[in-house]
Image (tube, rainbow, N blue to C red):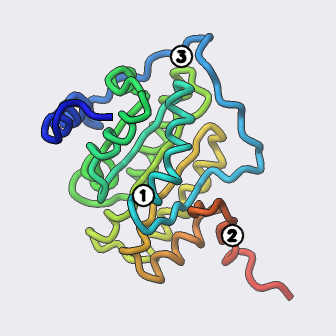
Amino acid sequence: FRVGGRNERRFLMEDLLAFMPSAGVQPELSKQRVAEPQITPASESQKRHICLLYLNPDELWQMLRPYILEYLKANLPVLYIGDSSPLYRLLELLSTEGLPLENLIARGLLRLLPPTQTYLLGGSFDVQRMLSFIEAAILGALEAGYKRIFIVGEMTWTLEVGLDSEQLKAYETLLNPIVEKYPAATIVCQYDLRRFDGPGVLAALLTHPSVQLPLGTAPGFYGLEKAGPTS
């Protein structure tokens, strides 16, 4: 999918990003019409706090693409918090799928935000503030009549601010009660294996019930520490 030359296409993506409001002035989600398609509710046993591990951008998009397309094509909201991946690149990838991006953005169904408007609002990371932000996004979708919401967060920002593995584990662990409280929410946390060290990856595995890999999903280690060794 190309629109003119390379520079012209990039310019169009920047236009879309400029058109997208910031976190403080997000448009209200458009009220859902009765006739809009719905995703069949997932089984209660399905884990909805997912650790996605990848080695390169192609692997990342291979795993993320089915989730995002499923939600957007069903007119369900997607909140994507980027960091190391340029947001215009995600828009480029979505444009090749034939999605009406301007319409989705205007209706509040596609929100792309940087860490400075989410995790690092005010210049630093505050666990309770971020948890409140996530919960508010979920409640906003439910109040607008949507049955589900998909939230994605790139986690490389933690490396840039010096968050250690224990601090990371504390935050990720606290996301699990939110997912349990709101069955409508699915949260995917993306970890670039080229940048996270062993303790960081272990913290991710210990705090997620499910792990997404290029070959499929596997159980995470969430609850393993609490359960302790078996006799």
- Tell me which numbered mark, 2 or 1, is placed earlier along the sequence: 1
Are discs 3 and 1 less than 8 Å apart at CB?
A: no
Kindly identify the residue that appears in the image at 27 percent across and 69 percent down: 161
**Camera-nearest label, 3 or 2:** 3
Quadrant of image for the C terminus: bottom right
Q: How far apart are the two marked residues, 3 and 2, measured between alpha carbons?
A: 36 Å
Within 10 angstroms of label 3, few (less than 14), some, or many (20 or more) residues?
Answer: some
Q: Which mark is residue 130?
A: none
Query: Dot 2 lies on which element?
Result: loop
Q: Position of residue 118 (x, y in %)?
A: 32, 48
**What element does badge 3 sit on?**
loop
- Residue that carries the numbered disc 1 in the rendered image: 58
Circle on res. 32: 3
> Considering only order in the chain, which callout, 2 or 3, is on the residue closer to the N terminus?
3
The amino acid type, in three-letter code, at marker 2 is Gly
Amino acid marked by disc 1: Asp
**Residue 216 sits above or below residue 73 on the image:** below
**How far is disc 3 from disc 1 in space, using C-alphas?**
33 Å
Quadrant placement of the N terminus:
top left
Residue located beneath label 2 in the image? 223
Task: Give the image location of residue 156, x and y in percent.
Answer: 35, 65
Q: Amino acid at mark 3?
A: Gln
Q: Assess disc 2: are there few (<14), some (14-19) or many (≥20) residues with their C-alpha within 10 Å of its C-alpha.
A: few
User: Residue 9 placed where, x, y %?
Assistant: 20, 36
Q: Is residue 122 above or below residue 26?
A: below
